[in-house]
Amino acid sequence: MTLAQPQAPQAPAVPPAGAPPPARRSVPGRIRVITGITVASLALLFGALAVGSMTAREGLQVIGRDAGPQVVATADLYLALSDMDAQVANVLVMGDQYAPQRAQALDRYEAARSRANEALMQALSLADTKAEQETVHSVLDRLGRYERLTGQALLLDERSKHAPGPPPQDVVLTYREATKLMRVQLLPQAYNLTLESGTIVRATYDEKAVMVPLLRVAVVVAGLLALGCLFWLQVFLARRFRRVFGPALLVATVTTAVTLISGMNVLAQDENALRTAKSAGFDSVLTLAKARSISNSMQGDQSRYLLDKEWADTYEHTFLDKAMSVVYLKAGNLRTYHDQVAKGDDVLGLLGPELVGPQGDQAMEAYRSFQAADGKFRELVASGRTNEAVAERLGPVTQAFEAYDRALVSLSAGHQAVFTRAIQTGEGSLDNLWRLLPFAIGAIGLLVIAGVWPRLKEYR
């Protein structure tokens, strides 16, 4: 049997001359890995800031520049249309007297007509869907028909030379057709435009009210991660090279912290701006615009109640319905409602939430005066004192309504200022953030390179 020859022991492998030992060879790789993770965390931070700011800007754009103004435009359309119909009714009850008031009412009719056309053009330019565009075109077509009917009614009324009060039957019938077109078709379509645009605003706000806080949390998480990676990189370099922390990486860390805090504050400001613009601004402006429109149509019902005896009860009921939608008080008829308004307890309806503070008290007091004047006006009509009723309608009733309308305008102006200021504040903070981000990205990138590159050069 042949025994196997023992093998000679092999000499250990000798690394090539000048090659670093295995421990040292792994250091540049570890530096690159940690640096890559740090850069990725910084990219995540800046990405979260970019997405968060773009989400907030989209919300501010929709509410403050797109759908929000469209809602206001369509609310102005409703007000202008109701004002047109009210002024025609006012002219028809004047008869062959009250020449100055007649000229003033016709001028106001033309002004309301111009406002309606302007609001329609603005609504058409802001319409995003085909359905909205078709609705606007339909309103334009029907408005033209309404103007033809009112033109005929005014011409017949002028030819009749009737005394103040109800005009001849042909005038009443022509105007009845016109006001029916306004109340049944034009005003509901205008209101639908407002609802459609308002739905867009509400949906956008609901979405952004959820997304912006979530993205702010994402920014915080990404920022803390980036700061942790920068600290990790500095600790590794300090321990490996037995040196104090590098000034470049320290400055990069501070810059990252400043960027994180700035981004958090901006997103918090935008969240607050969206909430303020929607709740304290837009909602109140829209509510007051609706209240003004309904109130304007309501005072038009006073003239219609006077000029159309056959439909007088109908116009009295519509007046009560509109009044209760503006300021709700439990009442079964108009006389009871007048009594309840005089007391003014537990006000609900559209104006209920808006009647706060000194301006709210003034608006409610003006509304009481308007309803008190209405009660006196109806007493004159019921007693058959038509001339006095017309004088009351064109004098004290109109003055009381105009004072009430001015109070609503004053309330709306305050909320409009809050809305505008909130949108400008939110957009301004975003603009400042976007001015900061490019410099922060460039500065932090250069500082990381300046902190890492000298250490890598030591291995060359």
Image (cartoon, grey):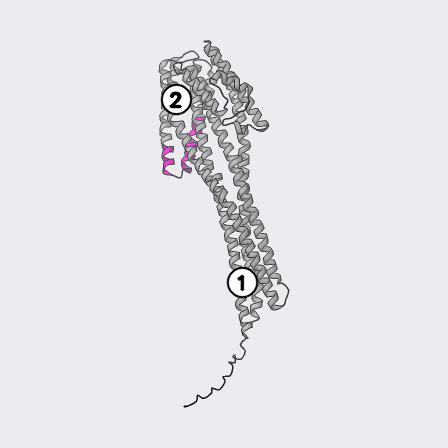
Magenta segment: does it hold 57?
Answer: no
Above or below for 155 versus 63:
above
Q: Which residue is mark 2?
A: 179
**Does the image show residue 105?**
no
In the foreground, 423 or 260: 260
- Residue 337: where, in percent of width, then height? 50, 18
2 or 1: mark nearer the eye: 1
| Label 2 packing within 10 angstroms: few (<14), some (14-19), many (20+) | many
Rendering quarter of residue 199: top left
Q: Which quarter of the image is occupied by the N terminus? A: bottom left
Residue at image position (56%, 59%) is 229
- Residue 314: where, in percent of width, then height? 41, 18
Above or below for 13 versus 398:
below
Q: Which residue is mark 1?
A: 35
- State the extent of the magenta-drawn residues as a range: 112-137
Would you say 306 lies left or right of 409 here?
left
Would you say 428 lies left or right of 313 here?
right
Magenta segment: does it hold 119?
Answer: yes
Label 1 residue SS: helix
In the foreground, 4 or 280: 4
Q: Which quarter of the image is occupied by the C terminus? A: bottom right
**Reading the chain from its start, which is encountered first: label 2 or label 1?**
1
Rendering quarter of residue 455: bottom right
Disc 2 marks which amino acid? Thr
Task: Give the distance between the C-alpha atoms of the residues marked 2 and 1, in whole angstroms.
Answer: 75 Å
Above or below for 158 versus 268:
above
Disc 1 marks which amino acid? Thr
